[in-house]
Image: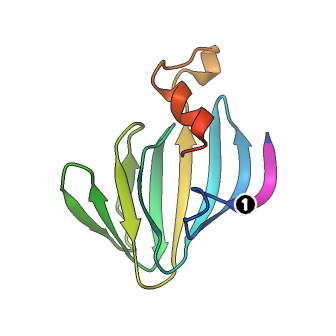
Amino acid sequence: MKFLARRKDGGPESHVVGYWLVEIRSMFSIALLRFGPGGRRAYHSHAFDSISWVLAGHLREQHIWGRHEVHRPGWRLEREVRGIGERKAGHLTSWWSTGRVDELGSAGLRHNRAAPLAKRGSR
């Protein structure tokens, strides 16, 4: 459980820092993410579904099967689904607001495929 916490997000090669308002891992989290120049270039999966909003900067996202997207500030919410392989890169600092949800966490249940991702620390 975290309240008002700051830590690196995404492993040693990542240029992402998370500022958590709250995280109850079995249920949800609310955070600001700062993507430094370079972003998170390694392909990764998410242990949680999330809804994010780009507040500043922009990032290029590449999915493992080849689709590319550019995320910019605006009113559009970005949905990320657990288990999807992707990487994000940018030349400038970007800020995202994000809410992550474990859909079955509130019932005390777990998705079978989320467990290995959580053990590796991927998010």
Q: Locate residue 120, reporting x and y percent.
A: 58, 39
Q: Is residue 51 above or below residue 117?
A: below
Task: Classify 10 Å Cα crowding around label 1: few (below 14), some (14-19), many (20 and above).
Answer: few
- Of all residues shown, which one is farthest toward the bottom? 92
Residue placed at 73% from the left, 60% from the top?
A: 7
Give the amino acid at mark 1. Arg
Residue 3 falls inside the magenta stretch: yes
In front: 12, or 57?
Answer: 12
Residue at the farthest front position: 12
Check residue 55 for magenta coloring. Answer: no
Highlighted magenta segment, given as a residue range: 2-7
Q: Which color scheme did the rendering employ for the protein?
A: rainbow
Q: Position of residue 33 (x, y in %)?
A: 58, 64
Q: Position of residue 70 (x, y in %)?
A: 28, 70
Q: Residue at x 27, y 53 (%)?
A: 63
User: Which residue is located at x 47 percent, y 45 percent?
Assistant: 50
- Main SS type for the magenta part? strand
- Residue assigned mark 1: 7
Q: Nearer the viewer, residue 66 or 20?
A: 66
* 87, above or below 3, in the image: below
